[in-house]
Image (tube, rainbow, N blue to C red):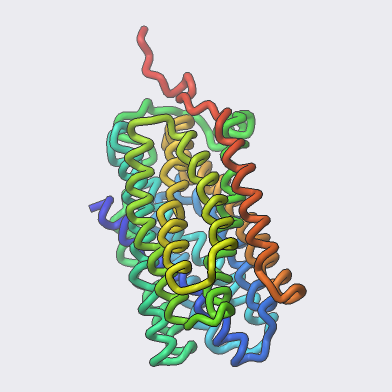
């Protein structure tokens, strides 16, 4: 029941936030805004998501995830609804940026992943984290084409109302997650949260993971928000963009499961290194290839297989090294770096387009960052800390 509820939370929460890029053109055209205005709002959203996740994780690690997710779902729904009625850029920053960002943070799939990781033995943990991540991608598959259909038939305002209603469905699911804070096969620890934070800060692997996730956020957020407009800017239809986002989600189901299985058998640090390297190669291929529908779909499938595959491996390393007691908090800190990268990627993508009329520069920056992220994962020490080892005496 916990695994099923966690997967449903990941599916809905991630599915809703993954489709906001489809609203870039209809909202900016209806309101007479620049793309930078929309980009700043979603950049703020990503930053607030990142800022809120460690706080949400701390509360969930202390009091359980249910009340965190319930409060987050209400704010998420209100912010999404308010996006449909505000008519000024500053109010859009508040609703789409601050409110929705906080709502996403307090319903984040990381809270569900932490609960799922605690109810299975260590030898199954990586696979379960892959399953939860795949569920988030399934949400992208479901929501992307249906959100486009809603925009076409209900208008962009009606589509936002439908997304707000979907966010409220997280409330009953939250009560199915347990309050347990220790994994089933884990040594019980009386470590305080402040001690856990000090321990993580002094661990080089934690620092390197944090940098790597910055790059992940930069790449994914830029593509999520700007790829639909990039596709239509090539002269292709909006339906091609919507199906491309759906293909990303569909292929990431397989990629996330494969990453979870990889982490069960081999060293987890090599997985993200390989993922970031391949992302850079795929981006360069997109820039060099002829711009046609098949090119977009091949890019979406290739990138989709790597899309969230970093999550089960990165969260798995955190749980493996530090244990699950403060997993939501520690992964929340790593994820804050992810969302800092998201903020920069979304904003910079809009700013560069408005000033150059092209997305090419941001694509090349994404490729270069991917190579750097691949390199920093190689020296990570993923061995469990000594305090997690059972006593032999």
227 vs 97, nearest the viewer:
227
Residue appearing at x 72%, y 71% in the figure: 351
Q: Position of residue 354 (x, y in %)?
A: 73, 76
Residue 299 appears left or right of 202 = left
Tally of numbered tags: 0
Residue appearing at x 53%, y 68% in the figure: 290
Residue appearing at x 48%, y 89% in the figure: 157
Occupied quadrant, residue 42:
bottom right
Q: Residue furthest left?
A: 1
Q: Residue furthest front?
A: 290
253 vs 384, nearest the viewer:
253
Residue appearing at x 66%, y 65% in the figure: 360
Occupied quadrant, residue 219:
bottom right
Q: Residue furthest top?
A: 393
Relative to 179, residue 375 above or below: above
Q: Position of residue 43 (x, y in %)?
A: 63, 66
Q: Can residue 54 be seen by looking at this rendering?
A: no
Q: Can residue 190 be seen by looking at this rendering?
A: yes
Residue 308 appears left or right of 101 = left
Relative to 375, residue 86 above or below: below
Q: Which quarter of the image is occupied by the C terminus?
A: top left
Q: Position of residue 124 (x, y in %)?
A: 29, 37
Q: Position of residue 45 (x, y in %)?
A: 59, 67
Relative to 263, residue 228 above or below: below
165 vs 174, nearest the viewer:
165
101 vs 141, nearest the viewer:
141
């Amino acid at each position: 029941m916990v695994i099923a509820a966690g997967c449903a939370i990941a599916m809905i929460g991630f599915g809703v936030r993954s489709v906001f890029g489809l609203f870039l053109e209809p909202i900016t055209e209806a309101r007479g805004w620049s793309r930078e205005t929309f980009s700043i709002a979603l950049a703020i959203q990503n930053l607030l998501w990142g800022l809120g996740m460690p706080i949400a994780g701390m509360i969930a690690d202390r009091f359980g995830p249910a009340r965190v997710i319930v409060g987050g779902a209400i704010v998420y729904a209100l912010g999404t609804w308010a996006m449909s009625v505000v008519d000024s850029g500053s109010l859009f920053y508040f609703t789409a940026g601050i409110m929705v960002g906080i709502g996403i943070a307090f319903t984040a799939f990381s809270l569900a992943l932490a609960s799922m990781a605690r109810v299975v033995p260590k030898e199954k943990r990586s696979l379960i984290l892959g399953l939860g991540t795949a569920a988030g991608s399934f949400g992208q598959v479901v929501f992307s084409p249906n959100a486009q259909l809603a925009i076409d038939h209900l208008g962009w305002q009606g589509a936002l109302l439908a997304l707000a209603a979907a966010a409220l469905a997280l409330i009953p699911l939250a009560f199915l997650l347990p309050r347990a804070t220790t994994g089933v096969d884990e040594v019980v620890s009386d470590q305080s949260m402040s001690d856990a934070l000090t321990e993580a800060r002094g661990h080089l692997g934690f620092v390197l993971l944090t940098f790597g996730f910055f790059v992940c956020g930069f790449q994914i957020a830029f593509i999520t928000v700007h790829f639909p407009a990039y596709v239509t800017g090539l002269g292709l239809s909006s339906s091609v963009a919507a199906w491309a986002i759906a293909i990303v989600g569909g292929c990431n189901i397989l990629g996330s499961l494969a990453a979870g299985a990889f982490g069960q058998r081999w060293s987890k640090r090599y997985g993200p290194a390989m993922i970031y390297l391949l992302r850079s190669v795929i981006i360069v291929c997109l820039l060099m290839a002829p711009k046609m529908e098949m090119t977009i779909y091949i890019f979406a499938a290739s990138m989709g297989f790597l899309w969230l595959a970093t999550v089960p491996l990165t969260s798995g390393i955190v749980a493996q090294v530090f244990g699950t007691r403060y997993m939501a908090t520690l992964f929340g800190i790593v994820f804050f770096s992810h969302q800092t990268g998201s903020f920069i990627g979304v904003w910079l993508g809009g700013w560069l387009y408005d000033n150059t009329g092209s997305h090419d520069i941001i694509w090349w920056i994404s490729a270069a960052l991917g190579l750097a992220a691949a390199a920093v994962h190689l020296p990570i020490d993923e061995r469990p800390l000594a305090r997690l080892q059972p006593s032999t005496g």
